[in-house]
Image (cartoon, rainbow, N blue to C red):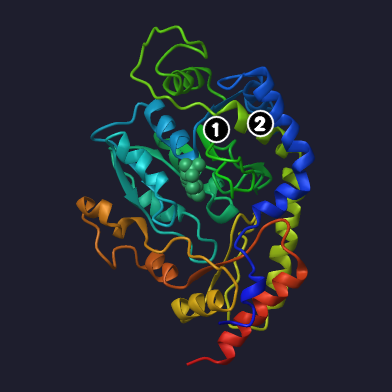
Amino acid sequence: MSKHSNDRIPFVDLAKQFSLIENDVMPAIRSVAEEAAFIRGPALTDFEERFADLHNIKHAIGVASGTDALSISVRTLEIGPGDEVVTVPNTWISTAFAISHAGATPVFVEINPDTHQMDPAALEKALTPRTKAVIPVHLFGHPAPMSDIGPICQRRGIKIVEDVAQAPLAREQGRLAGTLGDMACFSFYPSKNLGAYGDGGLILTDNDDLAATALRFSNYGQNGTIMSGVHDTVGYNSRLDSLQAAILLRKLPYLREWTEARRRAAARYDELLEPLPVKCPAAAPGAEPVYHLYVVQIDNRDACHAYLRENGVMAQLHYPIPLHLQKCYRNLGYKEGDLPISEGVNRRILSLPIYPEITDEQIKRVVDVLARFIESGP
Ligand SMILES: Cc1ncc(COP(=O)(O)O)c(C=O)c1O
Protein backbone atom coordinates (compact mmCIF):
# COMPACT_ATOMS: atom_id res chain seq x y z
CA MET A 1 0.00 0.00 0.00
CA SER A 2 1.45 3.37 -0.97
CA LYS A 3 2.04 5.99 1.66
CA HIS A 4 -0.01 8.51 -0.33
CA SER A 5 -3.01 6.28 -0.84
CA ASN A 6 -5.11 8.29 1.59
CA ASP A 7 -4.70 11.54 -0.27
CA ARG A 8 -4.82 10.61 -3.89
CA ILE A 9 -4.52 13.34 -6.47
CA PRO A 10 -7.50 12.74 -8.73
CA PHE A 11 -7.33 13.26 -12.46
CA VAL A 12 -10.12 15.84 -12.17
CA ASP A 13 -12.10 16.93 -9.11
CA LEU A 14 -15.68 17.70 -10.14
CA ALA A 15 -17.03 17.30 -6.60
CA LYS A 16 -14.71 20.08 -5.43
CA GLN A 17 -15.86 22.28 -8.29
CA PHE A 18 -19.51 21.62 -7.41
CA SER A 19 -18.90 22.61 -3.77
CA LEU A 20 -17.61 25.99 -5.03
CA ILE A 21 -20.53 26.74 -7.37
CA GLU A 22 -23.38 24.91 -5.64
CA ASN A 23 -25.21 28.17 -4.93
CA ASP A 24 -25.25 29.03 -8.62
CA VAL A 25 -26.16 25.64 -9.94
CA MET A 26 -28.84 24.30 -7.58
CA PRO A 27 -31.35 27.15 -8.12
CA ALA A 28 -30.96 26.69 -11.89
CA ILE A 29 -31.84 23.01 -11.62
CA ARG A 30 -34.80 23.85 -9.40
CA SER A 31 -36.17 26.45 -11.77
CA VAL A 32 -36.15 24.04 -14.74
CA ALA A 33 -38.03 21.51 -12.61
CA GLU A 34 -40.52 24.12 -11.38
CA GLU A 35 -41.16 25.35 -14.91
CA ALA A 36 -41.26 21.75 -16.15
CA ALA A 37 -39.47 22.99 -19.26
CA PHE A 38 -37.31 19.93 -19.78
CA ILE A 39 -36.97 19.73 -23.54
CA ARG A 40 -35.98 22.76 -25.62
CA GLY A 41 -37.02 25.09 -22.80
CA PRO A 42 -35.88 28.70 -22.34
CA ALA A 43 -32.65 27.65 -20.60
CA LEU A 44 -31.51 25.95 -23.81
CA THR A 45 -32.36 28.94 -26.00
CA ASP A 46 -30.54 31.25 -23.56
CA PHE A 47 -27.50 29.02 -23.46
CA GLU A 48 -27.38 28.67 -27.24
CA GLU A 49 -27.57 32.45 -27.61
CA ARG A 50 -24.85 33.10 -25.05
CA PHE A 51 -22.55 30.48 -26.51
CA ALA A 52 -23.05 31.83 -30.05
CA ASP A 53 -22.41 35.41 -28.84
CA LEU A 54 -19.27 34.38 -27.02
CA HIS A 55 -17.93 33.18 -30.37
CA ASN A 56 -19.54 35.92 -32.43
CA ILE A 57 -21.17 33.20 -34.54
CA LYS A 58 -24.77 33.32 -35.78
CA HIS A 59 -26.09 29.88 -34.84
CA ALA A 60 -25.63 27.53 -31.90
CA ILE A 61 -27.54 24.25 -31.77
CA GLY A 62 -27.48 22.32 -28.52
CA VAL A 63 -27.36 18.55 -29.05
CA ALA A 64 -27.15 15.50 -26.81
CA SER A 65 -23.35 15.03 -26.87
CA GLY A 66 -20.13 16.01 -28.59
CA THR A 67 -20.35 12.72 -30.46
CA ASP A 68 -23.77 13.69 -31.83
CA ALA A 69 -22.53 17.19 -32.68
CA LEU A 70 -19.89 15.59 -34.91
CA SER A 71 -22.24 13.00 -36.43
CA ILE A 72 -24.93 15.55 -37.18
CA SER A 73 -22.39 17.96 -38.68
CA VAL A 74 -21.00 15.31 -41.01
CA ARG A 75 -24.54 14.36 -42.10
CA THR A 76 -25.47 18.03 -42.50
CA LEU A 77 -22.60 18.46 -44.96
CA GLU A 78 -24.14 15.60 -47.02
CA ILE A 79 -21.12 13.39 -46.57
CA GLY A 80 -21.81 9.72 -47.18
CA PRO A 81 -20.69 6.47 -48.79
CA GLY A 82 -17.76 6.88 -51.18
CA ASP A 83 -16.58 10.08 -49.49
CA GLU A 84 -13.38 10.45 -47.48
CA VAL A 85 -12.92 12.64 -44.42
CA VAL A 86 -9.44 13.35 -43.10
CA THR A 87 -8.70 13.49 -39.40
CA VAL A 88 -6.00 12.54 -36.88
CA PRO A 89 -5.35 9.15 -35.27
CA ASN A 90 -4.77 10.64 -31.82
CA THR A 91 -8.25 11.70 -30.80
CA TRP A 92 -11.23 10.30 -28.96
CA ILE A 93 -12.96 7.70 -31.11
CA SER A 94 -16.06 9.88 -31.64
CA THR A 95 -14.27 12.01 -34.22
CA ALA A 96 -13.85 8.97 -36.47
CA PHE A 97 -17.20 7.38 -35.58
CA ALA A 98 -18.98 10.46 -36.91
CA ILE A 99 -17.39 9.78 -40.30
CA SER A 100 -18.10 6.05 -40.21
CA HIS A 101 -21.72 6.42 -39.10
CA ALA A 102 -22.32 8.61 -42.15
CA GLY A 103 -21.02 5.72 -44.29
CA ALA A 104 -17.89 7.68 -45.29
CA THR A 105 -14.26 6.60 -44.83
CA PRO A 106 -11.98 8.12 -42.20
CA VAL A 107 -8.46 8.88 -43.43
CA PHE A 108 -5.90 9.33 -40.66
CA VAL A 109 -2.90 11.62 -41.08
CA GLU A 110 0.25 12.34 -39.09
CA ILE A 111 0.59 14.87 -36.33
CA ASN A 112 3.23 17.32 -35.22
CA PRO A 113 5.04 15.42 -32.45
CA ASP A 114 5.59 18.56 -30.33
CA THR A 115 2.09 20.06 -30.38
CA HIS A 116 0.15 16.79 -31.02
CA GLN A 117 -1.91 18.58 -33.71
CA MET A 118 -2.66 17.63 -37.34
CA ASP A 119 0.32 18.14 -39.66
CA PRO A 120 -0.90 20.36 -42.54
CA ALA A 121 1.68 18.87 -44.95
CA ALA A 122 0.40 15.36 -44.17
CA LEU A 123 -3.16 16.58 -44.70
CA GLU A 124 -2.29 17.99 -48.09
CA LYS A 125 -0.70 14.68 -49.16
CA ALA A 126 -3.76 12.69 -48.06
CA LEU A 127 -6.28 14.64 -50.16
CA THR A 128 -7.94 12.82 -53.04
CA PRO A 129 -10.84 13.71 -55.35
CA ARG A 130 -13.04 11.87 -52.83
CA THR A 131 -12.04 14.07 -49.86
CA LYS A 132 -15.17 15.95 -48.83
CA ALA A 133 -14.14 17.30 -45.43
CA VAL A 134 -11.45 17.56 -42.81
CA ILE A 135 -12.02 17.30 -39.07
CA PRO A 136 -9.15 19.05 -37.30
CA VAL A 137 -9.21 18.29 -33.59
CA HIS A 138 -8.00 20.98 -31.20
CA LEU A 139 -6.49 18.21 -29.14
CA PHE A 140 -5.70 18.53 -25.44
CA GLY A 141 -6.87 22.18 -25.61
CA HIS A 142 -4.15 23.24 -28.06
CA PRO A 143 -5.54 24.77 -31.26
CA ALA A 144 -4.95 22.88 -34.50
CA PRO A 145 -2.93 24.89 -37.09
CA MET A 146 -6.03 26.35 -38.73
CA SER A 147 -4.11 29.14 -40.49
CA ASP A 148 -2.51 26.42 -42.62
CA ILE A 149 -5.39 23.93 -42.71
CA GLY A 150 -7.98 26.57 -43.69
CA PRO A 151 -6.39 27.67 -47.00
CA ILE A 152 -5.54 24.05 -47.98
CA CYS A 153 -9.24 23.17 -47.71
CA GLN A 154 -10.68 26.39 -49.09
CA ARG A 155 -8.61 26.17 -52.28
CA ARG A 156 -10.27 22.82 -53.03
CA GLY A 157 -13.78 23.41 -51.70
CA ILE A 158 -13.23 20.92 -48.87
CA LYS A 159 -15.39 21.52 -45.80
CA ILE A 160 -13.98 21.90 -42.30
CA VAL A 161 -15.69 20.56 -39.16
CA GLU A 162 -13.72 21.66 -36.12
CA ASP A 163 -13.68 19.28 -33.18
CA VAL A 164 -13.52 21.76 -30.28
CA ALA A 165 -14.54 19.22 -27.61
CA GLN A 166 -11.32 19.83 -25.67
CA ALA A 167 -10.65 23.45 -26.50
CA PRO A 168 -13.31 26.09 -25.79
CA LEU A 169 -11.66 29.55 -25.70
CA ALA A 170 -8.40 28.32 -27.28
CA ARG A 171 -7.04 30.70 -29.91
CA GLU A 172 -4.84 30.35 -32.94
CA GLN A 173 -3.24 33.58 -34.28
CA GLY A 174 -5.75 35.43 -32.09
CA ARG A 175 -8.77 33.66 -33.59
CA LEU A 176 -11.13 31.60 -31.42
CA ALA A 177 -11.32 27.85 -31.96
CA GLY A 178 -14.85 27.05 -33.10
CA THR A 179 -15.00 30.01 -35.49
CA LEU A 180 -12.52 28.73 -38.06
CA GLY A 181 -14.41 26.17 -40.14
CA ASP A 182 -17.83 25.54 -41.68
CA MET A 183 -19.15 23.89 -38.51
CA ALA A 184 -17.70 23.46 -35.03
CA CYS A 185 -18.53 20.77 -32.50
CA PHE A 186 -18.30 21.12 -28.72
CA SER A 187 -18.70 18.56 -25.94
CA PHE A 188 -20.00 19.28 -22.46
CA TYR A 189 -19.05 15.87 -21.08
CA PRO A 190 -18.69 16.45 -17.32
CA SER A 191 -14.89 16.59 -17.21
CA LYS A 192 -14.55 18.95 -20.17
CA ASN A 193 -13.41 22.55 -19.59
CA LEU A 194 -17.09 23.50 -19.63
CA GLY A 195 -18.80 20.38 -18.36
CA ALA A 196 -22.48 19.57 -17.80
CA TYR A 197 -23.80 17.12 -15.20
CA GLY A 198 -24.32 14.47 -17.84
CA ASP A 199 -23.84 14.35 -21.61
CA GLY A 200 -24.20 17.41 -23.78
CA GLY A 201 -22.87 18.95 -26.96
CA LEU A 202 -23.31 21.86 -29.34
CA ILE A 203 -22.78 22.85 -32.97
CA LEU A 204 -21.74 26.35 -34.05
CA THR A 205 -22.11 27.61 -37.59
CA ASP A 206 -22.46 30.95 -39.36
CA ASN A 207 -24.25 29.37 -42.29
CA ASP A 208 -28.07 29.69 -42.13
CA ASP A 209 -28.76 26.62 -44.28
CA LEU A 210 -26.34 24.39 -42.39
CA ALA A 211 -27.85 25.59 -39.10
CA ALA A 212 -31.40 24.79 -40.25
CA THR A 213 -30.34 21.34 -41.48
CA ALA A 214 -28.42 20.50 -38.31
CA LEU A 215 -31.36 21.62 -36.15
CA ARG A 216 -33.69 19.48 -38.25
CA PHE A 217 -31.44 16.45 -37.86
CA SER A 218 -31.30 16.99 -34.09
CA ASN A 219 -35.09 17.23 -33.75
CA TYR A 220 -36.36 14.03 -35.43
CA GLY A 221 -36.08 15.56 -38.88
CA GLN A 222 -38.75 18.15 -38.10
CA ASN A 223 -38.35 21.75 -39.22
CA GLY A 224 -37.20 24.16 -36.51
CA THR A 225 -37.62 23.38 -32.84
CA ILE A 226 -41.28 22.50 -32.81
CA MET A 227 -42.80 19.03 -32.45
CA SER A 228 -44.89 19.27 -35.61
CA GLY A 229 -44.93 15.57 -36.36
CA VAL A 230 -43.88 16.48 -39.92
CA HIS A 231 -40.61 14.76 -40.73
CA ASP A 232 -38.71 16.06 -43.75
CA THR A 233 -35.53 14.10 -42.98
CA VAL A 234 -34.73 10.87 -41.18
CA GLY A 235 -33.39 12.60 -38.09
CA TYR A 236 -32.20 11.92 -34.56
CA ASN A 237 -33.46 12.57 -31.08
CA SER A 238 -30.50 14.69 -30.03
CA ARG A 239 -31.31 17.78 -28.03
CA LEU A 240 -29.30 19.31 -25.21
CA ASP A 241 -31.48 18.77 -22.11
CA SER A 242 -32.81 21.97 -20.56
CA LEU A 243 -31.44 20.82 -17.20
CA GLN A 244 -27.96 20.56 -18.67
CA ALA A 245 -28.38 23.87 -20.48
CA ALA A 246 -29.44 25.56 -17.23
CA ILE A 247 -26.35 24.19 -15.47
CA LEU A 248 -24.10 25.23 -18.36
CA LEU A 249 -25.62 28.74 -18.34
CA ARG A 250 -24.56 29.11 -14.72
CA LYS A 251 -21.13 27.64 -15.36
CA LEU A 252 -20.34 29.64 -18.52
CA PRO A 253 -19.39 32.86 -16.66
CA TYR A 254 -16.65 30.89 -14.89
CA LEU A 255 -15.07 29.53 -18.05
CA ARG A 256 -12.53 32.33 -18.46
CA GLU A 257 -11.27 32.14 -14.87
CA TRP A 258 -11.17 28.32 -15.01
CA THR A 259 -9.17 28.59 -18.24
CA GLU A 260 -6.70 30.98 -16.60
CA ALA A 261 -6.40 28.58 -13.64
CA ARG A 262 -5.60 25.73 -16.06
CA ARG A 263 -2.97 27.92 -17.75
CA ARG A 264 -1.39 28.73 -14.38
CA ALA A 265 -1.32 25.04 -13.45
CA ALA A 266 0.29 24.18 -16.81
CA ALA A 267 2.90 26.92 -16.37
CA ARG A 268 3.69 25.57 -12.90
CA TYR A 269 4.13 22.04 -14.28
CA ASP A 270 6.39 23.44 -17.05
CA GLU A 271 8.53 25.15 -14.43
CA LEU A 272 8.78 22.22 -12.00
CA LEU A 273 9.38 19.63 -14.73
CA GLU A 274 12.12 21.68 -16.39
CA PRO A 275 15.05 19.85 -14.73
CA LEU A 276 13.59 16.41 -15.47
CA PRO A 277 13.96 14.35 -18.67
CA VAL A 278 10.29 14.86 -19.50
CA LYS A 279 8.98 16.56 -22.63
CA CYS A 280 6.37 19.14 -21.63
CA PRO A 281 3.53 20.08 -24.01
CA ALA A 282 4.76 22.68 -26.49
CA ALA A 283 2.63 25.59 -27.72
CA ALA A 284 3.00 26.45 -31.40
CA PRO A 285 3.80 30.10 -32.22
CA GLY A 286 0.55 32.06 -32.06
CA ALA A 287 -1.28 29.27 -30.19
CA GLU A 288 -3.11 29.99 -26.93
CA PRO A 289 -3.95 26.56 -25.49
CA VAL A 290 -6.53 26.03 -22.75
CA TYR A 291 -4.94 22.88 -21.28
CA HIS A 292 -7.89 20.55 -21.17
CA LEU A 293 -5.13 17.99 -20.63
CA TYR A 294 -1.49 18.35 -19.68
CA VAL A 295 0.24 15.64 -21.70
CA VAL A 296 3.95 14.98 -21.24
CA GLN A 297 6.14 12.57 -23.20
CA ILE A 298 8.37 10.27 -21.20
CA ASP A 299 10.54 7.13 -21.53
CA ASN A 300 9.23 3.94 -19.89
CA ARG A 301 5.76 5.39 -20.05
CA ASP A 302 3.85 2.29 -18.95
CA ALA A 303 6.03 1.75 -15.89
CA CYS A 304 5.80 5.45 -15.05
CA HIS A 305 2.02 5.43 -15.42
CA ALA A 306 1.74 2.44 -13.09
CA TYR A 307 4.16 3.99 -10.56
CA LEU A 308 2.24 7.27 -10.46
CA ARG A 309 -1.06 5.49 -9.87
CA GLU A 310 0.44 3.21 -7.19
CA ASN A 311 1.63 6.38 -5.50
CA GLY A 312 -1.71 8.14 -5.57
CA VAL A 313 -1.33 10.23 -8.74
CA MET A 314 -4.24 9.32 -11.01
CA ALA A 315 -2.49 9.95 -14.34
CA GLN A 316 -4.23 8.73 -17.51
CA LEU A 317 -3.50 7.90 -21.17
CA HIS A 318 -5.05 9.92 -24.00
CA TYR A 319 -5.33 7.62 -25.78
CA PRO A 320 -3.97 4.10 -25.33
CA ILE A 321 -4.35 2.95 -28.97
CA PRO A 322 -4.20 5.24 -32.03
CA LEU A 323 -7.42 5.06 -34.01
CA HIS A 324 -5.92 3.59 -37.19
CA LEU A 325 -4.83 0.53 -35.14
CA GLN A 326 -8.14 0.01 -33.33
CA LYS A 327 -9.91 -3.28 -33.94
CA CYS A 328 -13.04 -1.47 -35.12
CA TYR A 329 -11.00 0.01 -37.99
CA ARG A 330 -9.26 -3.14 -39.17
CA ASN A 331 -11.35 -2.97 -42.32
CA LEU A 332 -9.56 0.25 -43.32
CA GLY A 333 -6.36 -1.75 -43.83
CA TYR A 334 -3.92 0.27 -41.72
CA LYS A 335 -1.07 -1.59 -40.03
CA GLU A 336 1.48 -0.75 -37.38
CA GLY A 337 4.17 1.50 -38.85
CA ASP A 338 1.82 3.31 -41.25
CA LEU A 339 1.82 6.46 -39.10
CA PRO A 340 5.18 6.22 -37.35
CA ILE A 341 5.20 9.71 -35.82
CA SER A 342 1.77 9.32 -34.21
CA GLU A 343 2.60 5.79 -33.09
CA GLY A 344 5.94 6.90 -31.58
CA VAL A 345 4.30 9.75 -29.68
CA ASN A 346 1.50 7.43 -28.60
CA ARG A 347 3.97 5.16 -26.78
CA ARG A 348 5.36 8.09 -24.76
CA ILE A 349 2.31 10.15 -23.77
CA LEU A 350 1.11 10.50 -20.22
CA SER A 351 -1.61 12.89 -19.01
CA LEU A 352 -0.95 14.42 -15.59
CA PRO A 353 -3.81 15.63 -13.39
CA ILE A 354 -4.97 19.12 -14.33
CA TYR A 355 -8.13 21.01 -13.43
CA PRO A 356 -8.85 24.57 -12.33
CA GLU A 357 -9.01 23.67 -8.63
CA ILE A 358 -5.69 21.77 -8.50
CA THR A 359 -3.44 23.27 -5.82
CA ASP A 360 0.22 24.15 -6.02
CA GLU A 361 0.86 21.53 -3.36
CA GLN A 362 -0.82 18.86 -5.49
CA ILE A 363 1.19 19.85 -8.57
CA LYS A 364 4.41 19.64 -6.52
CA ARG A 365 3.44 16.18 -5.30
CA VAL A 366 2.77 14.96 -8.83
CA VAL A 367 6.20 16.20 -9.90
CA ASP A 368 7.86 14.69 -6.80
CA VAL A 369 6.40 11.26 -7.55
CA LEU A 370 7.48 11.58 -11.19
CA ALA A 371 11.00 12.59 -10.11
CA ARG A 372 11.19 9.56 -7.78
CA PHE A 373 10.21 7.29 -10.65
CA ILE A 374 12.92 8.78 -12.87
CA GLU A 375 15.59 8.52 -10.09
CA SER A 376 14.75 4.88 -9.52
CA GLY A 377 15.19 4.39 -13.32
CA PRO A 378 16.16 1.18 -15.08
C1 LIG B 1 -11.76 15.24 -29.09
C2 LIG B 1 -13.13 14.75 -28.71
N1 LIG B 1 -14.06 14.63 -29.67
C3 LIG B 1 -15.31 14.21 -29.37
C4 LIG B 1 -15.68 13.90 -28.09
C5 LIG B 1 -17.06 13.36 -27.84
O1 LIG B 1 -17.78 14.12 -26.95
P1 LIG B 1 -18.92 13.45 -26.02
O2 LIG B 1 -18.24 12.65 -24.97
O3 LIG B 1 -19.63 14.65 -25.47
O4 LIG B 1 -19.78 12.64 -26.90
C6 LIG B 1 -14.74 14.04 -27.06
C7 LIG B 1 -15.06 13.76 -25.65
O5 LIG B 1 -15.41 12.76 -25.18
C8 LIG B 1 -13.43 14.46 -27.38
O6 LIG B 1 -12.50 14.57 -26.44
Whether residue 150 appears in this view of the structure is: no
The residue carrying mark 1 has its beta carbon less than 8 Å from ligand 1:
no
Residue at the disc numbered 2: 51
Q: Amino acid at mark 2?
A: Phe
Image spot of residue 84 (x, y percent) = 30, 40
Q: CA distance from mark 1 to mark 2?
A: 9 Å
Number of on-image labels = 2
Left-right relation of 251 to 329: right
Image spot of residue 233 (x, y percent) = 35, 16
User: Is residue 226 or residue 90 the one in the foreground?
Assistant: 226
Q: Secondary structure at mark 2?
A: helix
Residue at the disc numbered 1: 202
Instruction: Identify the residue at image location x=44%, y=53%.
Output: 91
In the rendered image of this protein, does residue 234 appear above or below residue 145?
above
Image spot of residue 62 (x, y percent) = 55, 28
Left-right relation of 217 to 182: left
In the rendered image of this protein, does residue 26 appear above or below residue 10?
above
Density class for disc 2 (Cα within 10 Å; few <14, some 14-19, many ≥20) is many
Q: Quadrant of the N terminus?
A: bottom right
Left-right relation of 226 to 93: right
Query: Would you identify the image quadrant in which residue 195 lies?
Result: top right
Q: Amino acid at mark 1?
A: Leu
In the rendered image of this protein, does residue 132 appear above or below residue 223?
below
Whether residue 244 appears in this view of the structure is: yes
Left-right relation of 315 to 254: left
Instruction: Identify the residue at image location x=62%, y=58%.
Output: 12
Image spot of residue 150 (x, y percent) = 51, 41
Chain-order first, disc 1 or disc 2: 2
Q: Are marks 1 and 2 in contact (CB under 8 Å)?
A: yes
Instruction: Identify the residue at image location x=55%, y=39%.
Output: 186
